[in-house]
Amino acid sequence: MLINLYSDTQTRPVQAMRAAMAAAEVGDEQRGEDPTVNALCEQVGKLLDKPAAVFLPSGTMCNAIGFRLHIRPGGDAVHLHPSAHPIVAEAGGPSALSGAVLAPVPGEAGMFTADALEAALFPAGNRYTPCSRLVSVEQTTNLAGGRVWPLEQVRSVLEVAARHRLRTHLDGARLMNAVVASGVPAAQWARGFDTAWIDFTKGLGAPVGAVLAGSAELIEQAWRHKQMMGGALRQAGIVAAGCRWALEHHVDRLAEDHTNARILAEGLAGLPGITLDPDTVETNIVVFRLADAPRFCRRLEAEYGVRMSTLGPDLVRAVTHHDVDTSAVRRAADAVAAALCDQH
Ligand SMILES: *Cc1c(COP(=O)(O)O)cnc(C)c1O
């Protein structure tokens, strides 16, 4: 059987979640009449301590609409890390759908400091430069290896944003991983952000859905964009029930994914040819360096039944999740060791 460490998006809904979905009360979501969706939005609003929230088909749409809410036509820029999802994995959506200038802010491990942000901002009132408008933070950092921004660093970045009157957006695709790893509640992470969202299709293991939260006014505007982009739904309670089930049953267990990622990292770190510091593994993502990563990953899957993904010519990512237990993770580490040995 394949040990699938490609992503935590590979989880399949468990039987109890499917049962909850099958039994969901439903209505016309876009008329505000789906009780299960409404309950989910209320729940996420409370979780993130925001007055309003809207159910969306994907995290990508949360970013698309979030950016759209903040970016005005005519040269507005969003500041975010160069490895951030909207830059690398949303098909150019920020430019195509919001007309945003992407203004990367460099930094270690998918994060940037308040000073780096300050240095990256365009001077206000300058006729030549784009207009700094939005700061987007990714928690946890996906391609940088599931790292958790320290709370003080988020606070100081938000202070810079506030001082320059910028809007702020929290890409919380894996926010609950950060919550479990840090012990800091979701509402504290979301505090000070104009918009924030969580995804249910990553480690939480639901098949469909994400919720974007913010002020009542912003979420009212978000509904217009949801309609425009084709994200307004009908009996979406079926999928929202999976999200509700996940919030109740799959949050605390993220700790197991984190332990498994750590076990995997420790198993891989000593192997010849692999560069990896297990101490950098804070959540469920393990990123390591290895020469000729694409060829290695193809062999690892074809010959050893272990799937990982390549992030670059010499970069591999393995993500732990609900459907891969500790013994499978140990077998995956052994498989990598065997595959490396075989090369010689
Ligand atoms: C997965 C992911 C998204 C997009 O979410 P989807 O539900 O896959 O559309 C956005 N940001 C980050 C950091 C992600 O990991």
Image (cartoon, rainbow, N blue to C red):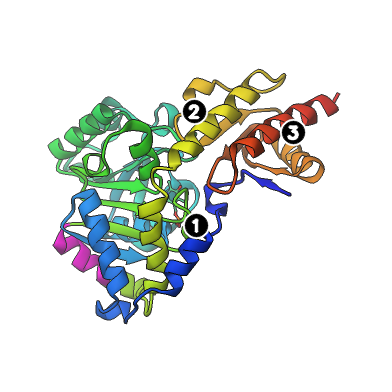
- Kindly state the secondary structure of the residue where label 3 is placed: helix
Q: Quadrant of the C terminus?
A: top right
Mark pair 3, 2: CA separation: 20 Å
Q: Which residue is mark 2?
A: 281
Q: Which residue is mark 3?
A: 335
Q: Which residue is mark 1?
A: 91
What residue is shown at x 35% (from left), y 54% (from top)?
A: 248
Q: In which quadrant of the rendered view does residue 328 lie?
A: top right
Left or right side of 325 for 231: left
Whether residue 243 is situated above or below residue 168 in the rendered picture: below
Where is residue 176 shown, x and y percent of the image? 36, 44
What residue is shown at x 19% (from left), y 42% (from top)?
A: 191
Residue range corresponding to the magenta coloring: 215-223
What residue is shown at x 50% (from left), y 31% (from top)?
A: 259
Where is residue 244 shown, x and y percent of the image? 36, 60
> Quick one: label 2 or label 1, which is nearer the N terminus?
1
Q: Amino acid at mark 1?
A: Ala
- Kindly state the secondary structure of the residue where label 1 is placed: loop
Q: Is residue 92 magenta?
A: no
Left or right side of 200 for 167: left
Which mark's residue is nearer the viewer, 2 or 1? 2
Left or right side of 76 for 321: right
